[in-house]
Image: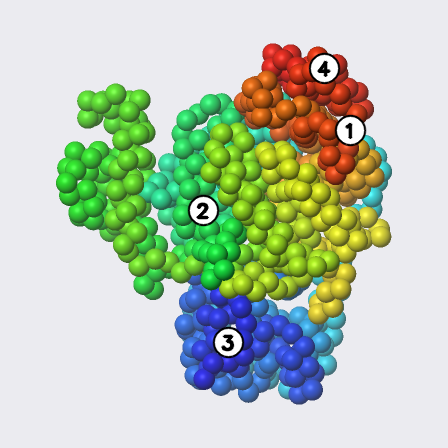
Amino acid sequence: MPNRLAATNSPYLLQHQDNPVEWYPWGAEALDRARQENKPIFLSIGYAACHWCHVMAHESFEDPATAALMNEHFVNIKVDREERPDLDSIYMQAVVALTGQGGWPMSVFLTPDGAPFFGGTYYPPVRRYNMPSFMEVLQGVARAWREEQSKLLQSSQELTQHVLQTIQMPAVTHTPLNPRTLEDATAQLSQAYDWKAGGWGKAPKFPQPMTIEYLLLCAAGGDQKAAEISTHALHAMAQGGMYDLIGGGFARYSTDNDWLVPHFEKMLYDNALLGRAYLHAYLLNGGAAFRQVCEATLDFMLRELLAAPDDEGLAGGFYSSLDADSEGEEGKFYIWTEDEVLQALESQPIEAELILAAYGFTPGGNFEGRTIPRRTLSDRELAERFGLDAATIPVRLAEINQSLLAFRSRRIRPGTDDKVLTAWNGLALILFAEAGRYLNRPDYLAAARRTADFLLSELHPADRLLRSWRAGKASHNATLEDYAALILGLLALYQSDPDPYWYNSALDLNQEMLAYFSDPDGGFFDTHVEQSDLLFRPRDIQDNATPSGSALAALALLQLAAFTGELDFRDRAAAMFSQVEAAASRYPTAFAFWLQGMHALLHAYKEVALVGDLESHAAQDLLKTIWETYRPGIVLAASRLPVPENAPPLLQDRPLLQDQPTVYVCQNFVCQRPVTRASELQALLR
């Protein structure tokens, strides 16, 4: 008999609908029952692609004896952290305060009023890993609630106060941002960099795309050390393992220091952020390998994460993730034996020999007797071994990969979390819009338009944005990160496709963001002002796997200030940067997106306005000049004449020069003389 989760729309919650546990989704029904029966709440938070969430579900939540104990003593609530990052943020901070670490599955015990008093992450079914069994934890908490309830209530009050103190923002200083902040952050990143394997930190090793993006910004400004670090990090990951050489796209993280053995789940946000880093690195140094990784990642997203059309033909958003497991085994979909490669390339023995050498296949494999494809020989080494022209190697390998991909596609696929999340799609929208413009790929630009149309039509039904969509139904109030990521995505799309609709949609969303999320003392809360089912309004300012909502909002305000001339937007952003400036200089990997925004504030956008016949050869030459290289320091508005009333103010009062398409470049309240020739524009943008 299915439990109450059967009526939900989250793939993660639906995975637990047949558990013998009497699960509730988060909501009034569960909270009211806990108060009426004076029972503690067991809150389990996870997500569909989480391997250890599946393990704990199989070991404990599917076990009748464990479920009976849970049902007798607790009101049990399941939460999809991707649908409700606000709940996840509050209770994750409590678990970290209690245990010194966090992660998923998250297991938290709450008072009937929702205040945490005990918690952890994964608990095994029997004592192991120096952890008590889950049954022992349940029995201990139930006994303490019966016998020492007043102590637990006191502990919950103290813990809640501690968590509240951790989210207090430093005071706004209103002093100008100090350039030394960025210099100190860059020095920290340089000192901590792993020149042997690439990246920062030890296993499990995360890819840090926002940190790399910040260094690419510095590299674009002439910082050679930042260029070396970012290039080295991207090359290290692109060798394969965490990067899928066969099908494109990145896994969540590496379980070893050398990027070989990934945690095999693939998340939309990782691929959106990493794809953009590889795009910008290609534009900076012209490395064809970086372009190949970027395009393979975009193609993976289109092939495996793009939402399928529904009965009404509606499509356009991207799904959230692919599971790490298939057929009950982590990574089985992605690993190979030599025999499988030979079978896939049965009619191409020379190609089989080439790929086996390129990807380091051996009879013993590099992972539990099988092989995770990884580049072990360079193009030059392969060319020497097989008597080939080194310039032809990338094309040959790409063609062989297509044969291997076709063979792999016949395997049983990992599960797909087919919900569409606004914030993660906003990040994907930025990537597709930029790749369409920089790489001259109309197909990528078309995907960006479809994504924007989908989000604006399906997830913005009335006066507010929603966070999650699945199977034709949108739900949950959007969070700050949803608003800010979509605003940035729409502004990126407007610069690739200068339709005022994209710009005005961003402007409208910004007004809602200011109305629903602003803190009177400065900055923003993470949740909508009407979100009433929380212990308190959270504010998570650190960047994690995705950018902080506040960091996204600050950058969105900066870009809108450049388009609109509204100095209040710039001042709001500057005040937010002042609140995190000290922390960002000391802990740059935890504030890398903030550092990107600070870089934009310190260097001031060049505001570029192009007017005239945008389809003419002259205008196209000007646009090509603008986007021929990585230009993070500009915002572009473009329009035919007469300029529509709903176009950005940046375009107003810009006459043609000599009846030719004309470009105006302004920065820091100073405009250069208008130009009509690409060579003149290039000099202004340099």
- Gap between marks 2 and 1, in whole Å? 38 Å
Residue 294 % position (x, y): 45, 36
Does residue 147 appear in the picture of this structure? no
Which label sits on residue 560? Answer: none
User: What residue type is disc 3 on?
Assistant: Ala
- The residue to which callout 3 is attached is 6
- The residue to which callout 1 is attached is 652
In the displayed structure, would residue 584 be above or below residue 10? above
Q: Quadrant of the N terminus?
A: bottom left
User: Which numbered disc flags the more N-terminal residue, 2 or 3?
Assistant: 3
Query: Which residue occupies 41% across, 45% down?
Result: 300
Helix, strand or loop under label 3: helix
User: Which numbered disc flags the more N-terminal residue, 1 or 3?
Assistant: 3
Give whichever of 381, 138 is nearer the camera: 381
The reply, left or right, for residue 334 in relation to residue 6 is left
For the image, the number of numbered tags is 4
Helix, strand or loop under label 2: helix
- The residue to which callout 4 is attached is 657
User: Which numbered disc flags the more N-terminal residue, 3 or 4?
Assistant: 3
Discs 4/2, front: 4
Question: In which image quadrant can residue 196 be found?
Answer: top left
The reply, left or right, for residue 18 in relation to residue 459 is left
User: Which numbered disc flags the more N-terminal residue, 2 or 1?
Assistant: 2
- Gap between marks 4 and 1, in whole Å? 15 Å
Query: Which residue occupies 58% across, 85% down?
Result: 73
